[in-house]
Image (cartoon, rainbow, N blue to C red):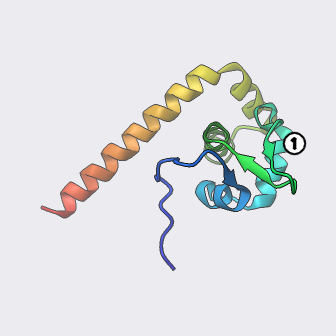
Amino acid sequence: MPKLNTDKEIQKLFYKMGEVSKMIGVPASMLRFWEKEFDCLKNLNKNRKGDRLYTAQNIEDLKTIHYLVKEKGYTLQGANEYMLGNRNVTDKNVEMLKSLEKIKAFLVELKQNL
């Protein structure tokens, strides 16, 4: 089974739940649960069949929520308040984290080629 590249740049306008589930590394049921709990996810786009369609911003929000809840140990209420109150700070931190991950990948590749 090929390894999923989670650092892949977001290129489409909308992503289906299965795609987002793989990107974030959580089951679809967790995404549905977070949609109910987090205000920033309340108004997801849906197609005619009712399937959820995630934008690039939704995916970034989900990555941040995952980081706060799973890695930093925030409660759902605390993470929701953080997302509401620190939207701009969160966006900058996500961008910085992406940059650092790219630098790390570059350095790992450089080390392997030595």
Decide: is 51 above or below 41: below
Is 114 or 17 nearer to us in this picture? 17
Decide: is 83 above or below 103: above
Asked where in the image residue 57 lies, by quadrant, the reply is top right
Name the spot of residue 50 as percent of width and height, x first. 87, 53
Is 55 or 104 nearer to us in this picture? 55
- The residue shown at (47%, 53%) is 8
Query: Disc 1 marks which amino acid?
Result: Lys
- The residue shown at (73%, 23%) is 84
What is the residue that sits farthest to the left in this orientation?
Answer: 114
Residue labelled with disc 1:
36
Asked where in the image residue 82 lies, by quadrant, the reply is top right
What is the residue that sits farthest to the front in this orientation?
Answer: 48
Tell me if 70 is positioned left or right of 103 in this view.
Answer: right
What is the residue that sits farthest to the bottom in this orientation?
Answer: 1
Name the spot of residue 26 as percent of width and height, x first. 69, 58
Name the spot of residue 98 as percent of width and height, x first. 44, 40
Image quarter (top left, top right, bottom left or bottom right) of the C terminus: bottom left
What element does badge 1 sit on? helix
Tell me if 87 is positioned left or right of 27 in this view.
Answer: left
Is 109 or 76 nearer to us in this picture? 109
- The residue shown at (59%, 56%) is 23
Tell me if 26 is positioned left or right of 1 in this view.
Answer: right
Is 46 or 74 nearer to us in this picture? 46
Name the spot of residue 39 as percent of width and height, x first. 81, 31
- The residue shown at (16%, 63%) is 113
Decide: is 38 above or below 11: above
